[in-house]
Amino acid sequence: MILNSKHFELTINRLCYQLIEIHNDFSNTVLIGLQPRGVNLLTRVKKRLEKILEKKVVCGKLDITFYRDDFRRRESTLIPSTTNIDFVIESKNVVLMDDVLYTGRTIRSGLDAMLAFGRPKKVELLTLVDRRFTRDLPIQADYVGKTVDTLVSERVAVEWEEIEGEDKVVLFTPDLDG
Amino acid sequence: MDSLSVEHLVGIEDLTKKDIEIIFKTADAFKEVINRPIKKVPSLRDITIANLFFENSTRTRLSFELAEKRMSADIVNFSASSSSLKKGETLIDTVNNILAMKIDMVVMRHPVPGAAKFLSERVDAKIINAGDGTHEHPTQALLDAYSIRERLGSVKGKKVVIIGDIIHSRVALSNIYCLQKLGAEVMVCGPTTLIPKYIDKLGVKVENSLQKALGWCDVANVLRIQLERQDIKYFPSLREYSMQYCLTKSMIDNLSKEIVIMHPGPINRGVEITTDVADSQQAIILDQVENGVAIRMSVIYLLASKINRE
């Protein structure tokens, strides 16, 4: 276990205040969650931010399936999720969100996909878990919930109360004997 | 896991219900893409597709071409009028010559039923059937069912009547397979001469009276009379056909419920459907065209994901 439900909430809270520190009242900032699991993070952060700021924060969901670089290199077909961005990001500050930052390839695709909706003024990246030393591309997060050092054979899973029943971040280490 | 069970799209007959659902789900995502300010995604940038049209087509070819371009595929076009077919080359030779130029996928329309299946068994590329004679036109059936799903929420349990020239229609056959797989009830309606003899073997109802058929259905899919395929006379005159089978505004207004009107195009206004019906709120003819691009993107994307580059 990397984060239990109590720390989980504290971490989300801290990320929200860090965002407010930079983006003030979010008048020129939009949040975009990457499908599928970055959207869970987006929903949580949005809810918390709106409570603190007492105003609506503009949010969108972005699916990156069609922009991936591993199309046809996988065994099964990648089936897309929905994209829902009903605003233009031209000249806006954009905060991209995903639950785990690992190789950086998803974020690379996300940056590409985002450009179909305009040219943003500035793009930042927020991630709940940053798996250090595992990057394939030169991509770093601006806001990090928790940094972990992991082996490639290990797996990090973020679980959500809405879906799995409890907020937590778990590290799975493969059985070396098996 | 979530892949199609087929390697080519030859006909709806080969697809499972799950295949159709995967195609629809993927089409939902593409429909969002084609409504963006920038309508292009890079998924197929290393795929080359040949559009081989051995028979005339406007909307299907444009729709396929747009679908391919929206996904950044490279495309080459070919139409029968300007080809070597007239010089005596066989279909296999024509296609193999094209494939020698490193083509990954072939979209083909051909006047002979079974041409797409024939090709899919013999050449090393993904084949998409864009209509083979009077056999099947799978992408049309998929977009028709998708449009019904979009308008009515689902296809299951809906009553769909296909009106007109059933015997010459690949759209009718593909539609029957597709709608039945999705759980709809299907009826065909038209003069007996234009209805195939053994069509009841497919489990569809047959009705000669347009009025009765309209009273039964939730959706009416009106087909064009394909004069170009009729080598004998199937009815005395076009005027007599339209007196009995032309869908008019008064017929629609007299029904107890509002039905959805569809047409795969091209429309012959005043023959099988009147202008006021074709342009009414109940008609989803132009939605069908828009959905056609999304459905074709979906099919091409899903089949392209099965091309192995290793």
Image (tube, coloured by chain):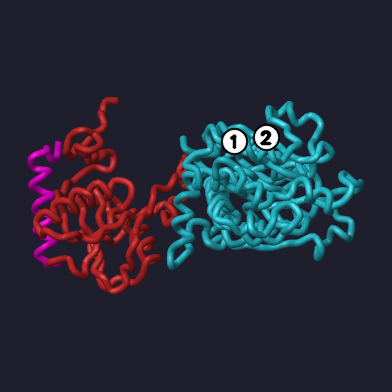
Colour seen for chain A: red
x and y percentages locating residue A87 in the rendered image:
32, 65
Residue placed most toward the observer, A154 or B138: B138
The answer to whether residue A9 is magenta is: yes
For residue B88, side relative to residue A69 (left or right): right
Do dots 2 and 1 share one subunit?
yes
> Is residue B285 shown to the viewer in this render?
yes
Question: Which image quarter: residue B116?
Answer: top right
Q: Earlier in the sequence, mark 2 or mark 1?
A: 1
Q: Which residues are magenta?
A: A1-24
Query: SS for tag 1?
Result: strand
- 2 and 1 marks in contact (CB < 8 Å): yes
Query: SS for tag 2?
Result: strand
Residue wearing tag 2: B187
Within 10 Å of the Cα at label 2, are there few (<14), some (14-19), or many (20+) other Cα atoms?
Answer: many
Colour seen for chain B: cyan
